[in-house]
Amino acid sequence: MDRQIHVAIQGEKGSFHEVAANDFFRNERIILVPCSTFDETVNSVVQGKADYAVMAIENARAGSILYNYNLIRESRLKILGELRLRIRQNLMALPGTTIGSLSEIRSHPIALAQCMEFLNTLKGLTLIEADDTAGSARIISEQKLAATGTIASASAAAIYGLEILAEGIETYKKNYTKFHIIGNKSAMPDMGDKASVCFATGHKPGSLARVLMILAEMDINLSKIQSVPRLNGNWEYMFYVDLELSTVSDMDNIVRALEEHTMNLEILGIYNKDTNLYES
């Protein structure tokens, strides 16, 4: 391990953000900067409290986290990398607890949504939405909450001394979350086989189609396109696009071509795409 870096995450120790941070920076010695919100996570880097931030951007089941797209753009930070993590959800509680003795399960709403097929088999339970999966595990442990379970990572169970009552309870077994690693542009080389850009188009028929045609003519593959409302009250949208680059792709030419047919064009990052699905 060559150096020590500070990495901001949304959530506490044992959260999936921590798992993602440890996976991406596996060759570094990291100090976590836990944050309660995604805003705080981004601001930790902007204010110099952290070198990088790891932020969930999309889940295979729940879809994109639209708010985080705007956070990245407005922060002026850059996407420096990505990681796709297999999310395995587990039901856990204080040692000695049985599933039949549970009266409530509390966890992050996305974690609950990912496990509804399993949860629907349990009768008489109250589901309570919380801010964080790992935070729920910590509270149950610290407050000795009997008859209360949570859904979180196996890492959270180990950290907070909880017993896993049922493992792998996620409905969709190919349950992956994509995380973006963001930071200042100078932190990593501005190169890679993937680029994330955003832009707006005019309110004219075929405006977006022309942009897509230009990219197709340049033999650029779009791996994702996501529209996010612009907060101007005019029902206009920003388009966030992921472009897969080849060894012969010229980003300067791509930018020049896009600038002729878009507005507010920004390069959010050029980085290497993640191909490791972290099967477990």
Image (tube, grey):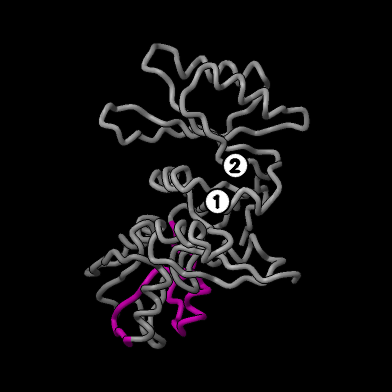
Q: Identify which amino acid the numbered label 1 is placed on.
A: His
Report if the CB atoms under discs 2 and 1 are less than 8 Å apart: yes
Residue at the spot of label 2: 269
Label 2 environment density (alpha carbons within 10 Å; few <14, some 14–19, many ≥20): many
Q: Identify which amino acid the numbered label 2 is placed on.
A: Gly
Indicate the quadrant containing the N terminus: top left, top right, bottom left or bottom right. Answer: bottom right
Label 1 environment density (alpha carbons within 10 Å; few <14, some 14–19, many ≥20): many
Q: Is residue 270 visible?
A: yes
Span highlighted in magenta in the image:
143-170
Q: Is residue 61 visible?
A: no
Residue 259 or residue 146, whichever sits in front: 259
Check if residue 148 falls in the magenta segment.
yes
Q: Position of residue 113 (x, y in %)?
A: 35, 55
Check if residue 151 falls in the magenta segment.
yes
Q: Is residue 138 rendered to the left or right of residue 198?
A: left
In the rendered view, tell whether residue 146 sits above or below residue 182. Answer: below
Could you give the CA–CA distance between mark 2 and mark 1, rounded to whole angstroms?
A: 10 Å
**Residue at 30% across / 67% down in the picture?**
122
**Residue at 51% across / 14% down in the picture?**
210
Indicate the quadrant containing the C terminus: top left, top right, bottom left or bottom right. Answer: bottom right
**Residue at 53% across / 67% down in the picture?**
18
Q: Earlier in the sequence, mark 2 or mark 1?
A: 1
For label 1, the SS is: strand
Furthest-top residue in this view:
205
Q: Quadrant of residue 152?
A: bottom left
Residue at the spot of label 1: 180
